[in-house]
């Protein structure tokens, strides 16, 4: 009697183990990348007649192909080429890009000027895009993940 219960128990454990390993690859491996691809393809659809430019986010810099831009519509394709999460915030401001007031490790985006556009929460290796109309003036392109601005993730851009 005792032996019978034990063998039944061993059998049911084996069935559960088989069921688990059998269903393992499907939900985790296949659904997650599909969702990421869908989100990226909608985000990176280029606007018509926009000037395309790349921005590379690394520790600790916001790197643009050019910091001297012509007024007009620009699509910035932003790549997080670093190893930490980053973002980019585009601010029209007459305050020099490295002289924003900072509290709690974050630059005062709104206090510095007008936020024109942003790409938030890019994990390492991820990319996104933003299309903005830039008028002539001075701009700062910053990463405002706490601590990153003061470590140097800010770039002065002139639009003519
Ligand atoms: Cu950053």
Image: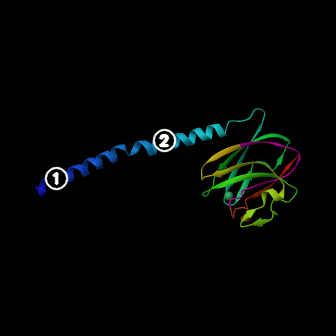
**What's drawn in magenta, residue-wise?**
130-145
Main SS category, magenta section? strand
Queried whether the magenta region covers residue 103, the answer comes back as no
**Mark 2 residue crowding within 10 angstroms, few (<14) / some (14–19) / many (20+):** few
Q: Residue 119 has which mark?
A: none
Residue 143 location in percent, x, y? Answer: 71, 56
Is the CB of mark 1 within 8 Å of ligand 1? no
Between marks 1 and 2 in the image, the one whose residue lies nearer the viewer: 1
Looking at this rendering, what residue extends furthest in the left direction?
1
Q: CA distance from mark 1 to mark 2?
A: 38 Å
| Residue 126 placement, left or right of 52 | left
User: Dot 1: what SS?
Assistant: helix
| Residue 67 placement, left or right of 78 | right
Going 86% across and 59% down the picture, which residue do you hit? Answer: 95
Residue 22 location in percent, x, y? Answer: 33, 43
Which residue is tagged 2? 31
Nearest the camera: 18 or 5?
Answer: 5
Nearest the camera: 56 or 10?
Answer: 10
- Which image quarter: residue 98? bottom right
Residue 70 location in percent, x, y? Answer: 85, 42
Where ligand 1 lies, by quadrant?
bottom right
Going 71% across and 36% down the picture, which residue do you hit? Answer: 46
Labels in figure, total: 2
Q: In the rendered view of the protein, which quadrant contains the C terminus?
A: top right
Nearest the camera: 83 or 148?
Answer: 148
Which residue is tagged 1? 7
Queried whether the magenta region covers residue 144, the answer comes back as yes
| N-term-proximal mark, 1 vs 2 | 1
User: Dot 2: what SS?
Assistant: helix
Looking at this rendering, what residue extends furthest in the top direction?
48
Looking at this rendering, what residue extends furthest in the front direction?
1
Q: Is residue 85 above or below residue 31?
A: below
């Amino acid at each position: 009697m005792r032996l019978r219960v034990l063998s039944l128990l061993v059998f049911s454990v084996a069935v559960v183990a088989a069921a688990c390993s059998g269903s393992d690859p499907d939900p985790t491996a296949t659904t997650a990348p599909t969702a990421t691809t869908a989100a990226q393809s909608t985000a990176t659809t280029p606007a018509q007649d926009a000037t395309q430019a790349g921005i590379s986010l690394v520790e600790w810099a916001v790197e643009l192909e050019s910091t001297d831009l012509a007024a007009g519509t620009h699509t910035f394709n932003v790549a997080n080429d670093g190893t930490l999460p980053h973002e980019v915030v585009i601010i029209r401001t007459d305050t020099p890009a490295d002289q924003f007031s900072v509290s709690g490790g974050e630059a005062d985006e709104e206090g510095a000027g007008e936020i024109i556009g942003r790409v938030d929460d890019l994990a390492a290796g991820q990319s996104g895009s933003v299309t903005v109309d830039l008028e002539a003036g001075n701009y700062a392109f910053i990463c405002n993940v706490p601590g990153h601005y003061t470590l140097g993730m800010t770039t002065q851009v002139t639009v003519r």
